[in-house]
Image (spheres, rainbow, N blue to C red):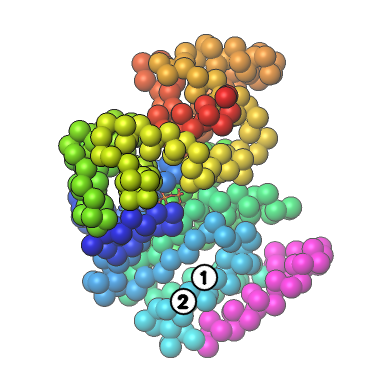
Amino acid sequence: MIKNKYGPPVEGEDFFGRERETEYAWQRLLDGNNVMFPAPRRVGKSSFAKKLLAVAKKEGWDTLEINLEKVHTEEAFLELFLEKLKGMSWWERAKEKASNLLDEVKSLKPKFKYEGVEVELEWQQNRADIYKAISDLLDHDKPTLIFFDELTVLLNSIVTTNSRKNEAENFLHWLRGIRQTSGTKIRWIFCSSIGISNFTFSHQITDAINDVPEYKLLAFDPDTSLRLIKALEESTSIELTDEIRQAMLDKIGYLLPFFIQILFERINSSIKVEQAKVDENLVANAYQDLLDDAHLNTWIERLQKQYGDKIDDAFALLRHVCQEKKGTKRDNLLNLMQKRHDADKAEQHLSALLHMLRNDGYLIEEGGLHFFRSPLIRDFWYKRHVL
Ligand SMILES: Nc1ncnc2c1ncn2[C@@H]1O[C@H](COP(=O)(O)OP(=O)(O)OP(=O)(O)O)[C@@H](O)[C@H]1O
Ligand SMILES: [Mg+2]
């Protein structure tokens, strides 16, 4: 039975729905494709990728998973990747070579701390060999599913490391080389909540990843959302009404399972702890409480982390858009940017930012108007940045 567990990716019985998506994506992998999930924050990418890993494992595949969000350098990546190879069915055969490589990579790390030019040089000379040796280790005959989460985060940190500008490109080409090994049975899943295509385009390296088709994972549909609410009711032994369930969906608008879970939990605790009645006020009150919920802070924090010097402009735009429920015209946003920049720069900043904010799931555009994709995030933004 599903538990109302949220925050980290869900697995096993806590993974709900997505039956059709799973079947489709698994078939794509079986057909020999790799896949990129470029979806906004909290849609459920990591959980979905883990679900596919579970399917692969059940079918006897080797699986390997790395969250690149916590890996800031290539050396750290290589070390982790080699460590993870210990889980492969063919590890015993490769053990000796792999251990030597691991030692070599590990010996680089402490040296890097001194940031010496010589170490950079040593690395530059060895890196191609090390990468090549690692790709030679892999067993291309063993069906294997490898999942790299938050690929763009690592690419960004490689790019921002001094004198390593080309290495994001090299890194992507290395991965591409592995993917293109003839007859390989290794399949890849990449997730990226910040637009990978924004990144590769702005660094002119789209070629390095254009063999990986994108699959846009969407929010839940209303039917699945209702099923999720009912499953949560069952597991927490509360009973809501059809009207309340529908009111939950109406309030949330953008039906991420995550939003459903946090709203449900507010309702659950107000019934169980505050002994609220199951009536029409229940949803409205729970929704108001949610606007102060720390879980939504991620929408602020991730912008702060990832928008670099565009952050103030991004905040200015969102602050404006959150005040207009009926949507904002582009011209109004352009005016706003013109107050902050020269005319030609204003246009450039606005297009770039609207593109990023749409890709990252903050805004949508419909009929020439820009809106928050989620009314919940819009109201949260208003409360935090306007009131
Ligand atoms: N299929 C699902 N069933 C139940 N809950 C889910 C499902 N997918 C996502 N969730 C809920 O949404 C939350 C976010 O899911 P997940 O971490 O997989 O999303 P993500 O798109 O990888 O997010 P981020 O961009 O923050 O990494 C999970 O903690 C879980 O509560
Ligand atoms: Mg994730």
Could you tell me which secondary element the residue under label 2 belongs to? helix
For label 1, the SS is helix
Badge 1 crowding class, 10 Å Cα cut-off, few under 14, some 14 to 19, many 20 or more, is some
119 magenta-colored: yes
- Badge number at residue 85: 2
Q: Say if the magenta span includes residue 195.
A: no
Dot label at residue 385:
none
Count of number-bearing discs: 2
User: On the image, numbered disc 1 is attached to which residue?
Assistant: 81
| Depth order, front residue of 93/37 | 37
For the C terminus, the image quarter is: top right
Q: Residue at x 50, y 39 (%)?
A: 292
Crowdedness of circle 2 by 10 Å Cα count: few (<14), some, many (20+)? many
Residue at the image point whose x is 25% and y is 39% from the top? 278
> Residue 143, how many percent across, how many down?
31, 71
Q: Main secondary structure of the magenta part?
A: helix
**Could you say where residue 286 lies in the image, as x and y percent from the top left?**
38, 38
Bounds of the magenta segment: 96-125
Residue, x 36% and y 81% (percent of image)?
Answer: 89
Using residue 276 as the reference point, say whether residue 168 is left or right of it. Answer: right
Tell me the CA gap for discs 2 and 1: 6 Å
Q: Nearer the viewer, residue 178 or 363?
A: 363
Would you say the residues marked 2 and 1 are in contact, meaning their CB atoms lie under 8 Å apart? yes
